[in-house]
Image (tube, rainbow, N blue to C red):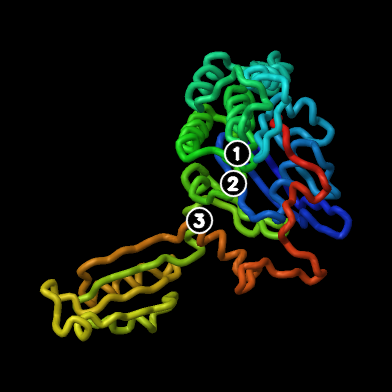
């Protein structure tokens, strides 16, 4: 499979603040890739490097086999970008803004069928009209009259209607209501089916879990996990709850079993239940040790069993629990700074325009 985005050993500092500290990232062509991390982890700085808005201090970054810094103009014809806070021209209507972005991409129209096989750029008029209807956007209103949610819709319509190779979405559903969130998810699936590559940065972990083929979790400017959800779940623990007709003999001594709780239902209910259940057990087990646990439970007589794989939220929090103090504040790092500033603001700039 072709690699659409490749980042290796990326470093970027703003004074004493190390926004990126050797970050690695690979996004395959045609996949939806989740890019996860709290504010200050380096997500938006990485995106700004990929868009050619920032120059990395060291390391390598390639997108569509081009250098984002030296080939920025050419790349922007083949990439659509939606930030989490969109600002529009006050005196242009939403429809005019969408068309303007389409014309900016239109410089790539001669490339289809060329040596690089790129898309055409520009807007698909039928797709534009369909998206405006689905997002319930009034394209005749001026930019100054739009709410935050409607400004996001303008940027999303412009991105999804553009004939580009890569979509970079940085908190794209900020300000959208749940109904429009569902429309957004359907659009992402459609774009994946069309063969587009999507890099999705989001704080809505359920959204990432629903949409993404693979995810990368970053922490303090480094990638700490990367792979499919199935791959990442294999590295962590599964929750198991079971009701048994006999005592869970030997369960506590099995390797990989954690936080075992046994509830004696026989003593609690002053007798054996009609279905013969005597106890309920709850535990966490390393995923690669699950078979032995299930055999042990079966030997004890299973009446009901629920096995729950770890959610993306659990995978995510596993890497950040040590940074959170009991009062909910982020930990102070060794140099006295807090890992809380938004990485997109580290250089004092604002990400406010959809490209």
Residue at the spot of label 3: 312
Mark sitting earlier along the chain (3/2): 2
Q: Secondary structure at mark 2?
A: loop
Say which quadrant the N terminus sits in. Answer: top right
Vertical side of 297 occupied by 308: above or below: above
Q: Position of residue 315 (x, y in %)?
A: 53, 60
Label 3 SS:
helix
- Residue at x-position 81% and y-position 57%: 18
Task: Look at 47% across and 33% down and name the residue there.
Answer: 183
Residue 310 location, quadrant: bottom left
What residue sits right under mark 1 in the picture? Answer: 172
Q: CA distance from mark 3 to mark 2?
A: 12 Å
- Percent coordinates x, y for residue 211 in the rendering: 49, 42
Give the percent coordinates (x, y) of residue 39. 68, 54
Vertical arrangement, residue 186 with respect to residue 92, above or below: below
Tell which tag, 3 or 2, sits nearer the viewer.
2
**Residue labelled with disc 2:** 202
N-term-proximal mark, 1 vs 2: 1
Q: Residue furthest front?
A: 145
Look at discs 3 and 1 and give the one toward the viewer: 1
Where is the C terminus found, in terms of image quarters? top right
Check disc 2: other Cα within 10 Å, few if <14, some if 14-19, many if 20+. many
- Give the camera-side residue of 133 and 60: 133
229 left or right, relative to 27? left
- Determine if residue 122 is in view: no
Kind of element beneath mark 1: loop
- Asked if the residue under mark 2 is in contact with the one under mark 1, i.e. CB atoms within 8 Å, the reply is yes
Confirm whether residue 100 shows in the render. Answer: yes
Q: Nearer the viewer, residue 355 or 96?
A: 96
């Amino acid at each position: 499979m072709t690699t659409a985005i490749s980042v290796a050993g990326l470093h970027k500092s703003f004074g004493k603040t190390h926004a990126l500290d050797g970050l690695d990232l690979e996004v395959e062509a045609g996949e939806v890739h989740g890019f996860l991390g709290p504010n200050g982890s380096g997500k938006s700085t990485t995106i700004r490097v990929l868009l050619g808005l920032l120059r990395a201090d060291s390391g390598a970054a390639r997108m569509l086999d081009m250098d984002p810094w030296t080939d920025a103009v050419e790349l922007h014809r083949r990439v659509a970008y939606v930030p989490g806070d969109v600002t529009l021209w006050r005196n242009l209507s939403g429809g005019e803004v969408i068309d303007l972005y389409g014309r900016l991409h239109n410089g790539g129209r001669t490339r289809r069928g060329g040596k690089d096989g790129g898309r055409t750029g520009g807007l698909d008029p039928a797709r534009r009209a369909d998206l405006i209807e689905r997002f319930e956007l009034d394209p005749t209103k001026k930019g100054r009259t739009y709410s935050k949610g409607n400004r996001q819709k303008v940027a999303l319509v412009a991105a999804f209607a553009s004939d580009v190779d890569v979509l970079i979405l940085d908190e794209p559903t900020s300000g959208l209501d749940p109904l429009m969130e569902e429309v957004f998810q359907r659009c992402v699936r459609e774009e994946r089916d069309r063969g587009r590559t999507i890099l999705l940065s989001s704080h809505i972990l359920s959204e990432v879990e629903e949409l993404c083929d693979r995810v990368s979790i970053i922490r303090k400017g480094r990638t700490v996990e990367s792979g499919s959800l199935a791959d990442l779940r294999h590295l962590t623990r599964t929750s198991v709850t079971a009701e048994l007709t006999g005592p869970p003999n030997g369960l506590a001594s099995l390797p990989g079993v954690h936080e075992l709780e046994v509830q004696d239902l026989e003593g609690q209910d002053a007798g054996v239940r009609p279905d013969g259940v005597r106890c309920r057990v709850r535990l966490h087990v390393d995923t690669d040790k699950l078979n032995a646990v299930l055999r042990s439970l079966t030997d004890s007589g299973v009446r009901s069993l629920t096995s729950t794989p770890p959610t993306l939220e659990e995978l995510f929090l596993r890497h950040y629990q040590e940074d959170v103090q009991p009062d909910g504040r982020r930990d102070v790092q060794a140099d006295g700074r807090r890992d809380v500033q938004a990485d997109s603001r580290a250089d004092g700039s604002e990400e406010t325009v959809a490209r």
